[in-house]
Amino acid sequence: MKLRPAFVAELAVNLLLPWVAYRLAEPYWGEVGGLIASAAPPLAWSIVELARFRRVDALSAVILLGIVLSLLAVAFGGGPRVLLMRECLASGAIGAAFLISLLAKRPLVFYLTRATVARETREGVARLELLWKENASFAGAMRLLTFIWGFGLCLDSALRTYLAATWPIERFLVVSPIIGYGVFGGLMAWTFWYRTRMRRIHGTHGLLGDAAAATNTSTLSVD
């Protein structure tokens, strides 16, 4: 499979450049300054993506949220390790939101699915609402998707938080994005596999096409 140049660039910005920025900045500005500099490449990438396409992909959104949360924590007295945990804080917060939504009348994945379907067809929203009310299998599938994403993101957050607290900073900057991409890729792969099983549920025909893959939070539109 041929890798797209844009994907290679994204990997370089989010995996390699944070470490390079830290190495260049740390001798002059210390650990905190180096970690702030390491956030600059993914932040710049997200801003460019937003300006060019009017959307932010989910990984960039996690990075942006993490930067905001970590800077707030540092402003209230947090140290360098808090800055190091920026993506951990974000993925944990998002994962917790997924899990907490299971206590509500409808889980978060249902609303993500409905938003995606609404952009494609008006009739699909009505069908989706009817499926939720009348088909227990469909409702159960929505809840399972929500649980898996919530659990996976919280597990990713817990693992990387532990590594951020115990590993040397440079090693963490190299390994953490790899873990993040691995977890996100695994959740995406499972979602695509499970979606094929969901197509067997009566009444879902035409609702779970390729475009509906956005229920896995791969893209956040700002149109």
Image: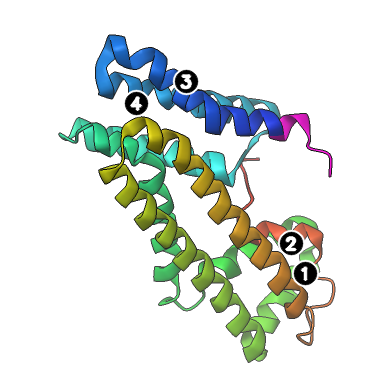
Mark 3 to mark 4: distance in Å? 11 Å
**Residue at the disc numbered 1:** 208
- Residue closer to the observer: 116 or 210: 210
**Residue at the disc numbered 3:** 20
Is 21 left or right of 52, judged from the image as shown?
A: left
Mark 2 to mark 4: distance in Å? 37 Å
Q: Amino acid at mark 1?
A: Leu
Bounds of the magenta segment: 1-7
Instruction: Tell whether position 223 is magenta.
Output: no
Mark 1 to mark 4: distance in Å? 41 Å
Circle 4 crowding by C-alpha within 10 Å: few under 14, some 14–19, many from 20: many
User: On screen, 155 above or below 101?
Assistant: above
Q: Are marks 2 and 1 in contact (CB under 8 Å)?
A: yes
Q: Amino acid at mark 2?
A: Ala
User: On screen, 73 above or below 124?
Assistant: above
Q: Are marks 1 and 4 in contact (CB under 8 Å)?
A: no
- Residue closer to the observer: 116 or 80: 80
Mark 2 to mark 1: distance in Å? 5 Å
User: On screen, 189 above or below 178?
Assistant: below
Residue 212's label in the rendered image is: 2
User: On screen, 130 above or below 12?
Assistant: below
The image shows residue 167 at horizontal and vertical percentages of 31, 41
Circle 1 crowding by C-alpha within 10 Å: few under 14, some 14–19, many from 20: some
Q: Earlier in the sequence, mark 2 or mark 3?
A: 3
**Secondary structure found at label 2:** helix
The image shows residue 70 at horizontal and vertical percentages of 31, 37
Q: Amino acid at mark 4?
A: Leu
